[in-house]
Image: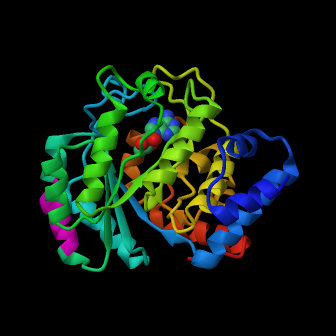
Amino acid sequence: MSNLVDALRERRTLSDKGLRELLESDDEGLVEALHRNAREVAVEQFGKVIWLRALIEWSNVCRNDCLYCGIRRSNTNIVRYSLTKDEILQACDLAWQLGLRTFVLQGGENPPAAEKLTPVVAEMRASWPEAAITLSLGELPYDTYALLRRSGANRYLLRHETANPAHYGRLHPAGMKLENRLACLRSIRELGFKTGTGMMVGSPFQTTDDLIADIRFLESFRPDMIGLGPFLPHHDTPFRDYPAGSADLTLRIYSILRLMLPQAWIPATTALATLRPDGRTAGILAGANVVMPNFTPVERRDSYALYDGKSRPGAEAAETLQQLKSELDTIGYHV
Ligand code: 5AD
């Protein structure tokens, strides 16, 4: 059966039927072959090297009301915060000193505040000319994307969340449309950002057909980066009682995407590591090649809970980084 995997590796594509088999099969040998081939392709491309990105959760203020997300506007049980410019620059400084060369500013969707980040981005660019600056700030007007790009940001992450418009409608408030999300992604790319997108695995109402549509979308859009992790319920959202997505399925999709898009940057995400203690190493052994350690000031982390179980008590960035390096060491990888 692993000729399916050979075909995918060789042709970098597969029929819907083949994809369904890889997503649903309970043949352990097949799944092992899938992960092994993906791992080999990742090592051919990148060596046993994992790229680190410093995640800075700059604000949890959000105008949006996504039904899965803990920082949705309707959640009145969290303390809203935005980091000051100095806090952001301090987090970057620490990350740079610890050897990280990419800063990721992520936050709730808040267009006026995003526009006000322009001078902060400009200062980051001036202070660290060689760093990559990645933004993940949701759907913004074209002009705001353009301003941020001109001030020195060079990458943007905006997950499509699901490529099925009807499913998209069930995950998001009335009025939010997949079409708009895709238009934003096209603008972002047109402005010269390296572009990342992706989806949650196991979000409520998701079917295998939806996942196949997601994989097809990624195959044709060819993002530079692919963010994907399992859905995890958050107790203050309408999806509180839905089950978490599957780690096993998430890992299969990492592998499928690695074989389709050998050069993509695929992080082993925090959501996966929340679901499974060995999520990061498992992700890497399935073909992921990026990890995003958290550089948000420790006292803000609790307020940036997109899902339950995310914030673990207190570890400072430096400590987390040390732990991560020894984790990688156990599987023969390094940063
Ligand atoms: N479970 C998993 N991932 C989530 N995200 C938001 N809420 C959740 C959740 N409950 C993901 C979305 C978003 C990214 C920043 O976090 O995919 O794009």
Q: Residue at x 17, y 43 (%)?
A: 141
Position of residue 182 measured from the top left corner of the image (x, y, whole percent): 34, 42
The answer to whether one can see residue 132 in this image is yes
Q: Does residue 158 lie above or below 124 as drawn?
A: above
**Quarter of the view holding residue 88:** bottom left
The answer to whether one can see residue 48 in this image is no
Q: Does residue 183 lie above or below 256 as drawn?
A: above
Nearer-the-camera pick, 62 or 146:
146
**Quarter of the view holding residue 4:** bottom right
Position of residue 256 measured from the top left corner of the image (x, y, whole percent): 65, 54
Coloring scheme of the render? rainbow
Nearer-the-camera pick, 91 or 226:
226
Q: Residue at x 32, y 48 (%)?
A: 185
Specify whether 301 is left or right of 252. Answer: left
Q: Residue at x 43, y 76 (%)?
A: 98
The quadrant of the rendering that contains the C terminus is bottom right
Q: Does residue 240 lie above or below 324 as drawn?
A: above
Specify whether 215 is left or right of 222. Answer: right
Is residue 312 part of the magenta span, yes or no?
no
Which stretch did the figure color magenta? 117-125
Nearer-the-camera pick, 242 or 324:
242
Is residue 122 part of the magenta span, yes or no?
yes
Nearer-the-camera pick, 288 or 177:
177
Q: How many marks?
A: 0
Position of residue 16 measured from the top left corner of the image (x, y, whole percent): 65, 42
Q: Main secondary structure of the magenta part?
A: helix
Specify whether 308 is left or right of 120. Answer: right
Position of residue 178 measured from the top left corner of the image (x, y, whole percent): 37, 33
